[in-house]
Amino acid sequence: MSKSRGSRSVSREFALRAVYQWRVSGDADMARLLATAEDADHYKTANAEYFQSLLEGILAHADDLNGTLAPLLDRGVEALSPIEHAALLLGAYELGYCLDVPYKVAINESVELTKKYGGTDGHKYVNGVLDKLAKVARRIEVEGAGSSR
């Protein structure tokens, strides 16, 4: 399996884990975050290029993403659990910058990762926030999906 043909879902999982690591440690050293991911057992199943582009994009745009998310939250981003915050950054980045990814996929992938790594109802919170964001960031796509029901 070539690096560009790996699973995007696995890439998102590694991106979530790296963003979590950055959020908890405060260390945004890209080489260290990439090396940690590359050492994981199932890294070879990831789409390495997509993982790296997600991680680079999230870190580069974190302030803007947090600013976009802030009005949709019921608390400050600093009060979010690190997993919820990482999932929201991942979803917000894909909604805003990865237009080849359908909005439902971007939301669902973040929700599923929050179910896997987050607290009991964290996925519901992530789903609600990203759903609100999609209605703004992907308005035409969301409206088109709603009219085709």
Image (cartoon, helix red, strand yellow):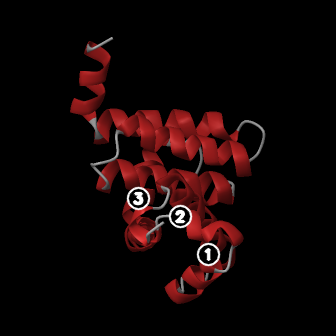
Residue placed under numbered mark 3 in the picture: 65
Residue placed under numbered mark 1 in the picture: 37
Residue 95 rendering spot, x and y as whole percentages = 36, 47
Foreground of the two, 127 or 105: 105
Q: Residue at 30% of width from left, 56% of height from top?
A: 97
Q: Is residue 19 above or below residue 126?
A: below
Rounded to the nearest whole Å, what is the CA distance between mark 3 and mark 1?
23 Å
Q: Is residue 94 above or below residue 131?
A: below
Q: Residue at 59% of width from left, 56% of height from top?
A: 85
- Residue farthest top in this picture: 149
Contact (CB < 8 A) between labels 2 and 1? yes
Rounded to the nearest whole Å, what is the CA distance between mark 2 and mark 3?
24 Å
Look at the numbered disc 1 and give the secondary structure of its residue: helix
Q: Residue at 60% of width from left, 79% of height from top?
A: 38
Residue placed under numbered mark 2 in the picture: 46
The amino acid at mark 2 is Ala
Rounded to the nearest whole Å, what is the CA distance between mark 2 and mark 1?
10 Å
Residue 93 left/right relative to 37? left
Q: Is residue 14 above or below residue 127?
A: below
The amino acid at mark 3 is Leu
Q: Nearer the viewer, mark 2 or mark 1?
A: 2
Look at the numbered disc 3 and give the secondary structure of its residue: helix
Residue 127 rendering spot, x and y as whole percentages = 55, 35
